[in-house]
């Protein structure tokens, strides 16, 4: 069994923001497999998530969205791993990455959080275990400094909407590829892809 977690913030005000790229990619997978999400609360752990069960490549897969805020994502992920009896090696986390340009993704295994607070929370709740797969979804360019927080929580600009949808679709495809073929082959296939349109050269 695999656990595919999309990171984001609950609430309609965050729905179309860069920070919710993980949520959106999981929603695309849910739609593709006609999955109905249901809510589950772990009262003793103080956490809630929405999840759906699907089958990908003849494997049972749990699609999950923590209903905590991003910085507390790890409590929901740890609760789900324990409840469904899933190993950390079978966890795939999808999240935004402002250091990657919009149009690219990067597949990693065993890496650090790189400043992504949801991933920091997951690693903390797994007692430092980083042996899970991640798909970083590019939402940059990074504006840097104090405005970074506002940038990732702002809606994606209208002119970038199609590229945003394209990279989310590629992320969903990459999840299926990882489940079928492993993260190494998936990284080789997807990490070099760039969906950004080529800039036309100016006439000389």
Image (cartoon, rainbow, N blue to C red):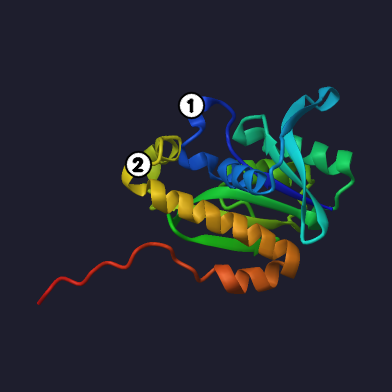
Check residue 13 in the rendering and tell me which mark sits there, or answer none: 1
Q: How many marks?
A: 2
> Badge 2: few (under 14), some or many (20 or more) residues near its Cα, within 10 Å?
few
In the rendered image, residue 154, in percent from the top left (x then y), is placed at: 41, 35
In the current view of this chain or complex, which residue is farthest to the front?
Answer: 34
Q: Quadrant of residue 176?
A: bottom right
| Lateral position of residue 85 relative to residue 141, left or right | right
In the rendered image, residue 195, in percent from the top left (x then y), is placed at: 43, 63
Label 1 vs label 2: CA separation? Answer: 15 Å
Which residue is painted at 73% across and 55% down in the image?
Answer: 130
Helix, strand or loop at label 2? It is loop
> Badge 1: few (under 14), some or many (20 or more) residues near its Cα, within 10 Å?
few
Which residue is painted at 33% across and 42% down in the image?
Answer: 158
Q: Is residue 44 above or below residue 57?
A: above
Q: Quadrant of residue 199?
A: bottom left
| Lateral position of residue 28 relative to residue 36, left or right | left
The answer to whether any part of residue 98 appears in the image is no
Which residue is painted at 74% across and 66% down in the image?
Answer: 180
Residue with the mark numbered 2: 157
Q: Look at the image and tell me in which quarter the C terminus lies.
A: bottom left
In the rendered image, residue 21, in percent from the top left (x then y), is placed at: 53, 44
Query: For this rendering, which residue is in front, 196 or 120?
Result: 196
């Amino acid at each position: 069994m695999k656990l595919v977690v999309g990171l984001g913030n609950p609430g309609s005000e965050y729905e179309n923001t860069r920070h919710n790229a993980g949520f959106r990619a999981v929603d695309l997978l849910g739609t593709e497999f006609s999955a109905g999400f249901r809510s589950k609360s772990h009262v003793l752990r103080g956490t809630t998530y929405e999840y759906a069960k699907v089958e990908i490549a003849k494997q049972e897969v749990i699609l999950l969205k923590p209903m905590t805020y991003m910085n507390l994502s790890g409590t929901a992920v740890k609760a789900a791993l324990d409840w469904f009896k899933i190993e950390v090696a079978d966890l795939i986390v999808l999240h935004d990455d402002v250091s990657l340009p919009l149009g690219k993704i990067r597949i990693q295994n065993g890496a650090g959080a790189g400043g992504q607070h949801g991933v920091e929370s997951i690693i903390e709740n797994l007692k430092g275990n980083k042996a899970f797969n991640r798909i970083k979804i590019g939402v940059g360019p990074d504006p840097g400094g104090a405005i970074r927080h506002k940038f990732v929580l702002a809606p994606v600009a209208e002119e970038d909407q199609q590229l945003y949808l394209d990279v989310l679709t590629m992320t969903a495809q990459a999840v299926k590829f990882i489940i079928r073929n492993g993260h190494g082959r998936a990284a080789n296939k997807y990490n070099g892809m760039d969906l950004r349109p080529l800039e036309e050269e100016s006439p000389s």
